[in-house]
Amino acid sequence: MERFIQTVGTRLGVEERVVKRALGAVLCFLNKKQEQGTITKDNFETILSVMGGGTAKEWMEDERQYSSHPQQHQPITLVGLIFFLLQLFGIWTLLKGLLQKYSATFGLKLLETMEDGFQLDQLLARLGITHEQGIVLVGMLVEFIKQKLTPETVQNLLQHIPALQAFLDESKKRD
């Protein structure tokens, strides 16, 4: 895991502590997805295990402590601002509700993927990770996880959180 962190830090041009905090942010995101029932607890625990178990939990705790200090947050991105305003005025919920009502599965999945992508992007932006760096980081993380987990587990993860697949696909385009 340490070699992975060093490789990511070198590739992104950031310190290892920032990489660890960013990985903690991604794990917090995945934990939230587990709490919402999007992925199973077993899948989340398996991911934690391959990322170092207790060490990965420490990164999550560091991220939680960091995010509890609003004065350290980075300015919101334009995309984040638009997403925030859509949520603030209830438009996002309205769109999702309409799509659910009319069984527009594809449209609903697209909105959920966008929402997850925005959330992940904002979590990383708070740490000073640019959108481009976030794409690379999440792509590298998914590739790392693919090497450690069964293909079925990875497929399940990418199927239930399509934003991860989108980050991975975009990362591959940039290689």
Image (spheres, helix red, strand yellow):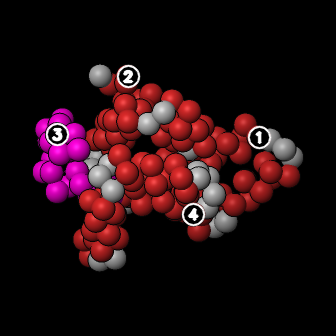
Considering the numbered disc 3 on the image, is that residue within a helix, a strand or a loop?
Answer: helix
Considering the numbered disc 4 on the image, is that residue within a helix, a strand or a loop?
Answer: helix
Q: Earlier in the sequence, mark 3 or mark 2?
A: 3
Give the side of residue 91 with respect to residue 164, left or right. Answer: right
Give the residue at mark 3.
Answer: 3
Q: Nearer the viewer, mark 1 or mark 3?
A: 3
Residues marked 3 and 2 touching at CB (< 8 Å): no
Give the residue at mark 4.
Answer: 35
Q: CA distance from mark 3 to mark 2?
A: 24 Å
Q: Is residue 76 magenta?
A: no
Q: Earlier in the sequence, mark 2 or mark 1?
A: 1
Q: What count of labels does the image hold? A: 4
Residues marked 3 and 4 touching at CB (< 8 Å): no
Q: Which of the 4 image quadrants contains residue 1?
A: top left
Q: Residues within 10 Å of mark 3 (few under 14, many from 20)?
A: few
Which residues fall within the magenta stretch?
Answer: 1-24
Q: Residues within 10 Å of mark 4 (few under 14, many from 20)?
A: few
Q: Amino acid at mark 4?
A: Glu
Q: Amino acid at mark 3?
A: Arg
Give the residue at mark 2.
Answer: 173
Instruction: Indicate whether 105 appears above or below 70.
Output: above
Q: Earlier in the sequence, mark 1 or mark 4?
A: 4
Considering the numbered disc 1 on the image, is that residue within a helix, a strand or a loop?
Answer: helix
Instruction: Indicate whether 97 appears above or below 6.
Output: below
Q: CA distance from mark 3 to mark 4?
A: 30 Å
Residue found at x 20% / y 55%: 18
Choose between 137 and 78: the one closer to the eye: 137
Q: CA distance from mark 2 to mark 1?
A: 27 Å
Give the residue at mark 1.
Answer: 105
Considering the numbered disc 2 on the image, is that residue within a helix, a strand or a loop?
Answer: helix
Residue found at x 76% / y 40%: 105
